[in-house]
Image (tube, grey):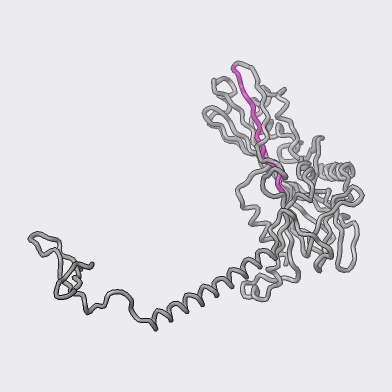
Amino acid sequence: MKKVIFVFILFAGMIPYASAAQLDAAIFFDDELVEPSFQFLRIIYIEYPNGGQISELLRGKTHAVSFVADSNTPGMDKLLHQLNQNLKEIPSNAIVTDAKINYQAKLQGNENSAVIEYKVELIPTITNHILKESFEKRTIDANWRGISIEEPMILETDYGSFDINNPKSAIDVMVPDVSKKLYDVSILEIPLIDASGIQKLQLSKWHSLFDNTAIISGAVEYKYTGKYVITHYTMGECSIGVGFCGDRLWNEEKNLDEQYKIKIVESRDDASISFEGYVDSNEIDGYDVFETSLKSLVNQKPDTDEFPATVMYGMAGFAVIGGIVMFLISNRKLKNDKNEGQTGIDPAYLRAFETSDSSGGYKTNRGESHLILSGKSKTAI
C-alpha cells in the first residue's frame, strides 16, 4: 500500500510545475509519524540592459551552492525549535521531532540579465498530529501544512554560517562582489520558508479523489494491491473559488554606475496529501482537520467540486445499454434486408460497356451501364 501512495507522489513530483511552496505528503493510517516534503522555489532576475559593473561581474558566469543538512548538522536544534514555535502560533497540535534540509541555488549570467534559481526542500518529522483516534477512525490536525518562518534559520555548513531562509546568503557565497553592491535591496531578503498560502485555502475548497484500485482483485496481476482504499487531497486547479494562478512579482531598482532592476518571480502555492482510507475535511475548535476511516464515513458528503463516481458509473452503464440497443436494431435491419433481397433496378435490364475508348483516352476499370427499355437503351449509371 505504501508503494502505491509513493508512486502517486513521485508522479506528482515529475510534473513541470514550479510553485512558491509545494507540499507532498502521505499519511498512513497505522503510522504515528508523518514526513511531508515542503519545497520552496523562487527565481530572482538581476537585469543590466545598459551594461555596467554588475554586468561585468555576472555576464557568462555560472555558480552553484548546494548542501544537505540533518540532525547532525550544527544549528538544527534551533531550527526545530523555530518550527515548533511557529506551529504553536498557527495554531497546530503537531510537533516536529527531526528534519532534513536539501538546499540548492544556481546562478547563470546571461547577456542582459542573471538568473538565480532557488530550491529549498524541508522534510520535517511530525508527530502528535492525531487529535482523536479509535480502532477504525482518526481525526488528524491539518494546520501544520502552513509552516512559515520569518526569522533567520542559520546552519553551519561547508560554506560557513548559512541562513537557509535568506536568499541573499547564496548570493554572498556565489558572487560576493555583486552582493556588496546590492546590500540594501530589500526584496533579496524576503524569507524562503513560507507555506502560509497552503493553509489560507480552506480544506473545503480542496479537491479530493477517491481511488479504490488497490483493493480491486483484478489489479493483482499488475502488482498494484493494498489493504485499503486511497484518498488524495489537492489544492486543485485555478478557478474563481480557489483563486487565480498569476505569478507573484516583486520589483526593485538600484541606481549605481548604471540602472539595475531586480525582479523576483514566484508561482502559486500547491499541495497534495494522500491518505489510507476514506477521508473528509472539517473544522474543530479552530483546527482544520481530516477525518479518516478504514470504512466508508457515515454521512460523508461528496465534494461539490467533484464529479461523483456514481454518476460516472451510471453514464458508463447507459452507454453500454445504448450500444446493445443499437446493435439489436442494426442486426434486425440487416435480417430484414436479407429477406427482402436486392432492391433497385433488376440487373437483367442493364447492359454494360467500357468507356474512354477514344484515341489517347485514359482507360480505367470503370464503365457505364445502359438501361434497356422496350428495345431502347438509356444511360443509367
Residue 225 visible (yes or no): yes
| Viewer-nearest residue: 191 or 368 | 368
**Is 263 included in the stretch rendered in magenta?**
yes
**Measured from the top left, where is residue 150 in percent x and y?**
81, 35
Residue 162 visible (yes or no): no
Outermost residue, left side:
359
Task: Report the side of 59 relative to 39 (left or right).
Answer: left
Number of residue marks? 0
Outermost residue, front side:
374
Q: State the extent of the magenta-drawn residues as a range.
A: 258-271
In the rendered view, would you say 55 is above or below 25? above
Magenta span: chief secondary structure: strand
Outermost residue, bottom side:
339
**Measured from the top left, where is residue 134 in percent x and y?**
90, 66
**Is 372 included in the stretch rendered in magenta?**
no
**Measured from the top left, where is residue 111 in percent x and y?**
52, 28
Q: Using the rendered view, name the quadrant where residue 322 is placed.
A: bottom right
Task: Report the side of 98 relative to 38 (left or right).
Answer: right
**Measured from the top left, where is residue 49 in percent x and y?**
54, 23
